[in-house]
């Protein structure tokens, strides 16, 4: 009981640590929020733009909503990925990485606190992006099944957190290029996960890779829930692969991170700042 209470307090400490960092650099957060909104609008305008280019009428409103869902969900997943995947790079940039790793807290508490903050903060940002986009487009959300959407995003976030924890080890192992490697990983997920298009348009081998990404199933489930009002039962087939990915990736991510940490401690990489 005492150990559990200590871990809970340590996890909350990392939640507060991340919150204070966001508050301290609120200007940058505002800039990135504006960027996310502009990016979502840019993608959404592809639908009416495509109608003008093709010169043919098609279901523009549905395509707009298809693209908006992809953009908003990806904004959420990207923020989760960034908050966790860059936690080491952020600590090294501020010069506090050694103090953080010397704190009397288990790494599991560190990861749990950072992950909890990442999910909460990403969810708020995604809602803000959706609200801003709705000022420009008449989004038909009356038939959306939000219970299904919530179930899909909650289950899918676990697997995505596992990937984020895994790539968080890259800045520990590769000081000069670790951050760029995190960004490359995120870009690869963007390509194969069907954010702006069904993955069926990809080459066959990329479709296989896409089926290993939890984002693929999250996007499929979210689109079914919002576009078609699908119930949890209607999208039940996406939950087994999501749970399987989470069961493998999350423990593996923690193992990779702990292994990378021990290597960094032995090789003196925590001391170096570039």
Image (spheres, rainbow, N blue to C red):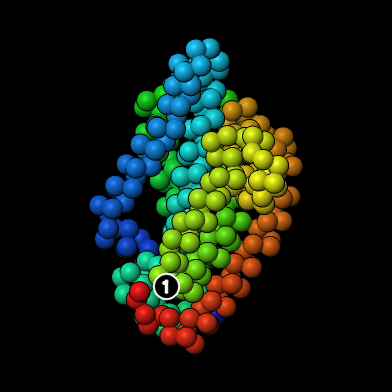
Q: Tell me which residue sits at (61%, 56%) in the image.
A: 159
Q: Nearer the viewer, residue 215 or 21?
A: 215
Q: Quadrant of residue 268?
A: bottom left
For image coordinates 37% across by 66% down, the residue present is 90
Looking at the picture, how far across and down is residue 23, in whole percent? 29, 58
Q: How many neighbours does mark 1 have within 10 angstroms: few (below 14), some (14-19), or many (20 or more)?
A: some
Q: Position of residue 24 (x, y in %)?
A: 26, 60
Query: The N terminus appears in which quarter of the rendering?
Result: bottom right
Using residue 28 as the reference point, say whether residue 11 is left or right of it. right
**Residue 247: image x %, image y %?**
69, 61
Q: Nearer the viewer, residue 135 or 36?
A: 36
Quarter in which the C terminus is drawn: bottom left
**Residue at point 48%, 21% (across, down):** 50
Q: Is residue 253 above or below residue 187?
A: below
Residue 7 visible (yes or no):
no
Measured as percent of width and height from the top left, residue 127 is found at 43, 40
Left or right side of 206 for 171 = left
The secondary element bearing badge 1 is classed as loop
Q: How many numbered circles are shown?
A: 1
Residue 191 is left or right of residue 217, and the answer is left
* 146 shown above or below 77: above
Residue 77 visible: yes
Q: Residue at x 32, y 63 (%)?
A: 21
Asked whether 266 or 205 is in front, the reply is 205
Q: Which residue is mark 1?
A: 175
User: Does 147 sit above or below residue 112?
Assistant: above
As drawn, the residue found furthest toward the bottom would be 266
């Amino acid at each position: 009981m005492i150990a559990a209470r200590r871990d809970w307090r340590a996890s909350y400490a990392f939640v507060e640590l991340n919150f204070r960092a966001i508050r301290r650099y609120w200007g940058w957060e505002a800039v990135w929020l504006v960027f996310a909104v502009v990016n979502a609008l840019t993608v959404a305008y592809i639908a009416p733009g495509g109608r003008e280019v093709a010169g043919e009428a098609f279901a523009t409103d549905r395509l707009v909503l298809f693209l908006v869902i992809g953009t908003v969900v990806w904004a959420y997943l990207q923020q989760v990925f960034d908050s966790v995947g860059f936690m080491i790079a952020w600590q090294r940039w501020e010069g506090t990485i050694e103090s953080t790793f010397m704190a009397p807290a288990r790494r599991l508490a560190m990861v749990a606190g950072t992950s909890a903050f990442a999910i909460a903060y990403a969810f708020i940002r995604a809602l803000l992006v959706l609200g801003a986009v709705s000022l420009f487009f008449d989004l038909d959300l009356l038939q959306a099944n939000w219970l299904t959407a919530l179930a899909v995003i909650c289950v899918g976030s676990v697997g995505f957190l596992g990937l984020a924890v895994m790539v968080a080890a890259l800045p520990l192992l590769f000081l000069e290029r670790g951050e760029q490697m995190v960004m490359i990983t995120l870009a690869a997920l963007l390509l194969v996960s069907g954010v702006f298009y069904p993955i069926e348009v990809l080459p066959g081998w990329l479709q296989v890779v896409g089926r290993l990404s939890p984002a693929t199933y999250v996007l499929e489930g979210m689109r079914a829930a919002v576009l078609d009002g699908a119930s949890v039962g209607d999208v039940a087939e996406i939950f087994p692969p999501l749970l399987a990915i989470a069961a493998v990736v999350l423990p593996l991510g923690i193992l990779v991170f702990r292994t990378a940490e021990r290597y960094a401690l032995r090789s003196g990489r925590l001391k170096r700042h570039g």
